[in-house]
Amino acid sequence: MRTFFSATFAVLLLLCVVAWKIQPPPPGGSRTTLTWSTDNNPTRQEQVALFNKLNPDLYLMIDPNNTDQQKVIVQAIGGVGPDVFDTFGQASLEAYVRAGVAWDITEAMTEAGIEIPKIIWPVAVPSCVYKERYYGFPCNVNANAMWFNKDIFDKAGVPYPKPGWSWDDLIRIAKQLTVKGRDGKIQQFGLYFGWTNWGDRNDLLYQFGARIFNDDGTRCEIGSPEAIEAMQLSQDLMYKHRVTPSPIDEAALSTQGGWGSGGITYLMGGRVAMAYGGRWWLNLIRKEKPDLNLGVVEMPYAKVPSLAGGARCALVNRNSPKREAALRFIKYLASPEYNQLLNDQADALAPVMASAYTERFLHNPEWPKEDYNEVWREVVRKARPDELSPFLRGGEMSAISTQFDLIKSNLKAPAAALRDAERAGNDRILRNARLRPALNKLYLELTGSKP
Amino acid sequence: MKKLNPKERRNLMIGLSFLLPNLVGFLLFTLGPVAFSFGASFTNWDLTGIEPLQYIGIDNFANMFSDSQFWLYFVNTLYFLIGLPLAIFGSLGAALLLHQKVKGQVVYRTLLYLPSVTSGVAVMILWKALYNPDWGAVNQILESVARAFGHPEFRGPSWLLSTQNALALGVEKVGVVPNQWGIGAREALIFMGLWGAIGGGNTLLYLAALGNVPQELTEAAEMDGASRFRIFRNVTWPQLAPTTFFIIVMGFIGGLQGGFEQARVMTLGGPAGTTTTLAYYIYNKAFVEYQMGYACAVSLVLFGLIFAVTLVNWKFGNKEVSY
């Protein structure tokens, strides 16, 4: 028996040695390998290829399997994290900074002559600058506008929407373009709006002048008359005017068109005439439906021309032994080469503002039908970051989201739902401020009173 | 205590050395994390680092018990246990059928076991499509049947999109709300679970137990003129008691820990939190909100609940096991 176990152990050991010997060489050869934890898609591959071409001594590779924030934090603290990782928004940046994994690159960037807040879109600044210190650089910046399918408009003889249109105009047009089938079910909706998407919904709230939180985030104000008016409109579009799909309609649409689900797929499948989305949709449209005849217009603004925007930023892992090399990737994001590539790819908008003020951006000769790039530039310029409360984290918004679910499912009137959402939000803010010493102190500083 | 001689001591050491890898693994990867989690539940441990780590006594528990969301998810977790007796009887029925000596028995057994060997996520995606209220197969069948019985106006439930449920539980606080009565996401997940449970390990356990029922008992009952139902009730069923007890205990444990995959893949805990169970709540608290201390406290409560239920099962269920 002893011989058997010894022999088995020896064979396993030998196999380990063999496996170690025959392992393939690192993909970058002798170059320094950098890992970027981000999603993998064709545009990202091109962005990486350009970086590798411009930096022959470095080899950047993508790790799409470890992009979750908790994974990045745990791995970075453990010394095995990516060299560069993505972050979305102010709350996420703050979490990385506080966890000690985001490297402060203020001095390095200043020395390189890159004053981040001055050159990037204002909406992206909170995603990479925290307490006036620089921690990263945006990879791309996004804000939404209204896509419309020109062929559907032409077929119905409806004029295209024009800037400055109103919600009444939109409802009238959407009704004209909503088509029922023989079975009485709606086959084509006039409008698609991502009600489940927190950002899209906030766009509607902001343009009615509604607030989610007050300026310092110590109070939730989602129960205001402005917010109720905005959400009433959203409910009416689904259940009164029947021009945009309810959750059940959306489930029905999701595979009938053969395009999966979501606004982009409904638009490509001809299931909606207008859809609210970003420029990055072109990534898929160019590939899947290059002949689609599309236009873009800003969404109608009820009271204030205001909408939310966001940025995906790249940060350097403070604990990475290759952080100096990783810094070169951050500088690459500020380069004209990267910004032009990104604008050409239509992976939303490039981070450097100046890159969008060129003739090439407005009229890319490779995509002559895309004559609406000025609209994207305008919405990103107007966009503002989402409202946050330092007393609530993303996940804790579920008490509020539940009420939005009830509005969306037509189970509750917006007035009652939003009043309850406001109460739930404020209860949570006060509870967190009472229970957590740091938040307690912050609340006292901001309001002058104990929570 | 008997003193060991050198040979016995050597044998003991050899035995222990064989146990050591398992023991070390258990200590490092099971008992260690459990103990750590127990300690962490009394702290404000937070992955974002907003607060310095400190002992906060029972604050997490006080916070949890005063949170209406926790109680909603607690009720959701218990609600899903409704499927347990149905799953037990379903798997027993399937086992009885498969126990018959018919041609192609192996094929039937293999087919029925398919849910257990199919990838859970793939099955859930398939069920999601089956439950589509508009074009899903489930509603298509229901509506066809309704049409055949002269009710063309009948529309099937909204399944995963509906907050309605068979007990008319409200979505915002624990209580009965009459307009919530119906069939919704919770029932959809229970039915799907039934399908998996009937064609799963429980059926196999019953099948094995049926094979162990002494033939002479059945034959004696037959000779005494007992009907098939009486034979099942008075001979077979009592012989299956240990298996049933095991399945009940494991079913409660699995049921109370369950709901994560379904919520993650099919519903994201919605609509309006109606399919969020304690397991999914723990995940959200730990890995979405990064409140590790709080998540550990919920885990501890869930552990206590499972432990209590198992004790009750053991105390009362054991009495019914006479074989």
Image (cartoon, coloured by chain):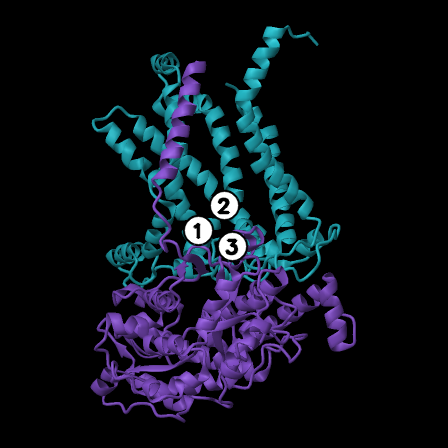
Chain colours: A purple, B cyan
Q: Residue at x 61, y 33 (%)?
A: B312
Residue that label 3 marks: A81
Which percent across, then down, holds residue A134? Answer: 58, 73
Q: What kind of residue is marked 2?
A: Gly
Chain letter of the residue beneath label 1 in the structure image: B
Which of pointers 1 and 3 indicates the residue nearer the eye?
3
Q: Residue B258 — which label?
A: 2
Q: What kind of residue is marked 3?
A: Gly
Which percent across, then down, holds residue A412? Answer: 51, 71
Looking at the rendering, which quadrant does residue B304 occupy? top right
Q: Residue at x 62, y 40 (%)?
A: B34
- Pointer 3 with pointer 2, Cβ within 8 A: no
Q: Residue furthest right?
A: A449
> Which corner quadrant holds the C terminus of chain A?
bottom right
B285 relative to B187 in the view: left or right? right
Chain letter of the residue beneath label 3 in the structure image: A
A341 relative to B275 in the view: left or right? left
Q: CA distance from mark 1 to mark 3?
A: 30 Å
Q: CA distance from mark 1 to mark 2?
A: 9 Å
Residues beneath discs 1 and 3 located on the same chain: no
